[in-house]
Image: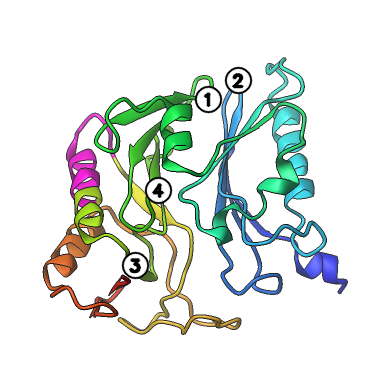
Amino acid sequence: MSEQRMNEPDVLWLDPDTVQLRQPKTSHWEAPFLYLLFGRERALLIDTGATTDEQQFPLRATVERLIAEWLRRNPVVFVRPYPLVVAHSHAHRDHIAGDALLRDRPGTTVVGTSPAEVIGFFGFRSWPDETVAFDLGRRVVDVIGGPGHEPSAVVFFDRATGILFTGDTVLPARLYVRDLAQFRSTIERLIRFRDDPTAPVRELRGAHIEMSTDPGVDYPAGTVDQPDEAELALRPRILDRVLSALDELRGTPGERVVRRRFIVVLDR
């Protein structure tokens, strides 16, 4: 098998308009998940992965192929080139490195990664407490302020699928808390959002898997072979368990609170 073939992302169509991609560990041990959401007027790509090398991780070619496939099935979309918005769950390098591979694509807007750029692009007026609706064309994505892991972090809720795309904030992995007060506020904000009957959250999907199928057991950073990974999708009630775990933190840097599906780490 060629190196190019080995480094192609794992592609999973969650429904006819939603793609989950995973950068393979052959190209970077972080193996982040990316999400591509199609609307009638434009698509939204959440995160771009951990490398700037198209040969190492063919992000541009994969996105172009998926867009072409979707457009063949949806010939009523007349805008050419089909617009693409590239946004991010947060600004850590393993989620933004691939921006350079898409920046010169016709019809593409790459959202900046500073808090000011995120606030300005999505139109937040009361950051981070406001939820902003972002319309892809007959498909609305709610953008929720999510700092605490990283200052410009956001969470995306897709009304069409009921999926809350949580980046590195909530996922089957180590939840690195850089600002405890902001992180707690974000979890409380997500719980309020989840409990709003007008926004039914079906599941959460984050950006990594670091937990094994053994409850509370994680793979060390840098692990390439993860044969017994936990499932990526989390049930909405996981947010209550994260909030409960935060209550156990005493404020010591490096402190860990272990739960079955995640580990909270105070990283400051």
Which circle marks residue 175 in the picture? 3
Name the amino acid type tagged 3. Answer: Leu
> Mark 2: which secondary structure?
loop
State the separation of the CA atoms marked 4 and 3: 13 Å
Residue at the disc numbered 1: 136
> Which is closer to the viewer, label 4 or label 3?
4
| Mark 1 or 4, closer to the camera | 4
Q: Name the residue under label 4.
A: 153
The C terminus lies in which quarter of the figure?
A: bottom left
Around disc 1, counting alpha carbons within 10 Å, would you say few (fewer than 14), some (14 to 19), or many (20 or more)?
Answer: some
| Viewer-proximal residue among 212 and 81 | 81
Q: Position of residue 228 (x, y in %)?
A: 49, 81
Disc nearer the start of the sequence (4/2): 2
Horizontal side of 24 relative to 219 (left or right) equals right
- Give neighbour class at mark 4: few <14, some 14-19, many 20+ (Cα, 10 Å): many
Calculate the distance from the C-alpha at mark 3 to the C-alpha at mark 1: 30 Å
Separation (CA) of disc 2 from disc 1:
6 Å
**Residue 121 covered by magenta stretch:** no
Instruction: Give the quarter of the figure containing the N terminus.
Output: bottom right
Task: Name the front one of labels 3 and 2.
Answer: 3
Disc 3 residue crowd, few under 14, some 14–19, many 20+, Cα 10 Å: many
- Is residue 167 in view from this perspective? yes
Query: Mark 2 = which residue?
Result: 41
Name the front one of labels 4 and 2. 4
Amino acid type, callout 4? Ala
Q: Give the range drawn in magenta.
A: 187-200
